[in-house]
């Protein structure tokens, strides 16, 4: 066994398993320590992403990819987000293309068939006319109906022209067309193509957030067919509730090169076990009470016992490894617990370190980092914007200048 005197968690995690072909690099994650099946984050015990259910340590990228990823995905499906909708039994894309001076706009109607029927939703795609492939594509899950048909829109959550002028393509779909954000009707669009409408959903069936993630994968099915798009450079992005869905989409669907959960908070990048984080943040009980149609019944069983959850959200961030994860918080976004988001980001680095990619880019792993600055490691990016809950021009500046599609 390699000698390991250091308390750095990444090194400890790798050494505990008796050495590894992957040589741990010294990384700046001193805030976290490990003991057997748990890791310590900010003085508390959390599930260890690098332990199999059997208790054996995960010490190589191959063990992570072949075994541990599947365990974690199954745990998140069963206990947090619910089982995803299956792939459609049939799917078609109808594309209406319009030329603008600087941009080609395509409105793609994705028609999906499941065992209970057929339905459709639209994806809007704006491709800059640069004469070359876009530098990458941002695919937005848009729960606010913000993305219209206008390629000149330059402000708000979806500043289309700012993005295309920077050389990127921008795509979006209205989350409500996949699953209405409403406890009475959330099943009515895509979910009931796969579940009999007159029957209760199974207790572990995914609800709206899971369906939105599934919708992002259907949009990706299309993007893979579009000759204007490089499908190896697609970032799935969402703000807040859509940020939760974006991260879950990226965790499950490895076709996404990047996931950007912006201010995703509870059941996004915020650690569940922190409760209200001492700042009145949204707990598991609160999110399930306020938004009963977002998550399955099985998640509600943890309302008053989050410590029994078999997973926590640092493991969701880690499911992006070795692809890029971009965590973005805002200083005044207490409901989302920015510190809890930061700690999950830092704790995920130990999994990236299996690939030698554990550098978080942060100057220190202690809360709180400098604000309004993008920190970039080889596969992990982070920023803490000053101000309140939102996806603003300042966030987009950091994304567009963040070199997110390369190592
Ligand atoms: C509410 C909810 C959050 C969610 C947010 C949003 O504040 O509590 O979990 O992220 O809405 O989507 O804007």
Image: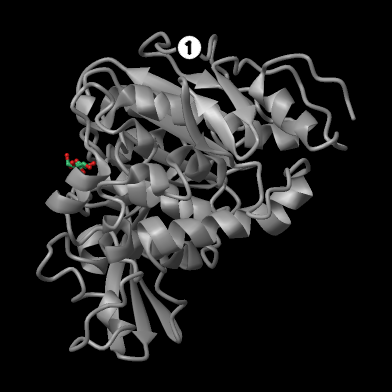
**Which class describes the residues within 10 Å of circle 1: few (<14), some (14-19), or many (20+)?**
some
| Residue furthest left in the image | 184
For the C terminus, which image quadrant?
top right
Q: Quadrant of residue 387?
A: top left
Q: Quadrant of residue 187?
A: bottom left
Count of marks, rendered view: 1
For the N terminus, which image quadrant?
top right
Q: Is residue 295 left or right of residue 317?
A: left
Seen in the picture, residue 42 relative to 369 is either above or below; the reply is: below
Q: Which residue is mark 1?
A: 366
Residue at the image point whose x is 54% and y is 63% from the top: 224
Q: Position of residue 322 (x, y in %)?
A: 65, 41
Badge 1 element = loop
Seen in the picture, residue 105 relative to 96 is either above or below; the reply is: above
For the question of whether residue 270 can be seen, the reply is no
Q: Position of residue 205 (x, y in %)?
A: 34, 71
Q: Is the residue indicated by label 1 positioned so its CB lies within 8 Å of ligand 1?
A: no
Q: How is the image coloured?
A: one colour
Front-most of 70 and 141?
Answer: 70
Q: Position of residue 367 (x, y in %)?
A: 42, 13
For the question of whether residue 115 can be seen, the reply is yes
Front-most of 202 and 217?
Answer: 202
Instruction: Locate ligand 1 by image quadrant.
Output: top left
Q: Position of residue 165 (x, y in %)?
A: 39, 34
Q: Is residue 257 left or right of residue 5?
A: left
Residue at the image point whose x is 28% and y is 33% from the top: 275
Front-most of 191 and 234?
Answer: 191
Front-most of 8 and 66?
Answer: 8
């Amino acid at each position: 066994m390699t000698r390991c005197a250091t308390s750095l968690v990444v090194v400890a995690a790798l050494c505990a398993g008796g050495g590894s072909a992957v040589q741990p690099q010294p990384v700046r994650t001193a805030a976290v320590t490990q003991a057997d099946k748990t890791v310590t984050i900010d003085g508390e015990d959390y599930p260890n992403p690098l332990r199999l259910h059997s208790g054996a340590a995960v010490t190589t990228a191959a063990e992570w990819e072949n075994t541990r990823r599947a365990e974690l995905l199954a745990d998140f499906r069963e206990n947090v987000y619910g089982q995803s909708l299956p792939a459609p039994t049939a799917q078609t894309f109808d594309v209406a293309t319009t030329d603008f001076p600087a941009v080609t706009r395509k409105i793609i109607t994705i028609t999906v068939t499941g065992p209970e029927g057929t339905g459709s939703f639209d994806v809007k795609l704006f491709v800059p006319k640069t004469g070359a492939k876009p530098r990458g594509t941002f695919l937005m899950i848009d729960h606010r109906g913000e993305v219209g048909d206008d390629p000149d829109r330059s402000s708000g959550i979806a500043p289309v022209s700012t993005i295309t002028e920077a050389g990127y393509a921008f795509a979006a779909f209205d989350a409500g067309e996949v699953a209405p954000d409403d406890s009475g009707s959330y099943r009515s669009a895509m979910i009931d193509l796969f579940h009999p409408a007159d029957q209760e959903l199974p207790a572990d069936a995914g609800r709206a957030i899971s369906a939105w993630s599934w919708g992002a994968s259907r949009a990706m099915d299309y993007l893979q067919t579009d000759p204007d798009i490089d499908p190896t450079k697609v970032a799935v992005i969402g703000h807040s509730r859509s940020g939760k869905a974006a991260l879950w989409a990226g965790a499950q669907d490895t076709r996404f090169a990047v996931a950007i959960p912006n201010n995703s908070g509870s059941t996004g990048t915020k650690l569940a076990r922190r409760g209200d984080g001492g700042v009145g943040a949204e707990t598991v009980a609160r999110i399930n009470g306020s938004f009963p149609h977002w998550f399955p019944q099985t998640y509600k069983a943890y309302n008053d016992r989050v410590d029994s959850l078999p997973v926590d959200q640092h493991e969701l961030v880690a499911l992006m490894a070795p692809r890029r994860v971009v965590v973005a918080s805002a200083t005044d976004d207490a409901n989302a617990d920015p510190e809890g988001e930061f700690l999950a980001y830092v704790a995920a680095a130990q999994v990236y370190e299996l690939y030698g990619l554990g550098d978080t880019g942060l100057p220190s792993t202690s809360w709180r980092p400098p604000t309004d600055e993008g920190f970039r490691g080889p596969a992990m990016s982070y920023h803490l914007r000053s101000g309140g809950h939102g996806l603003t021009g300042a966030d987009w500046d950091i994304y567009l200048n963040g070199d997110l599609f390369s190592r």
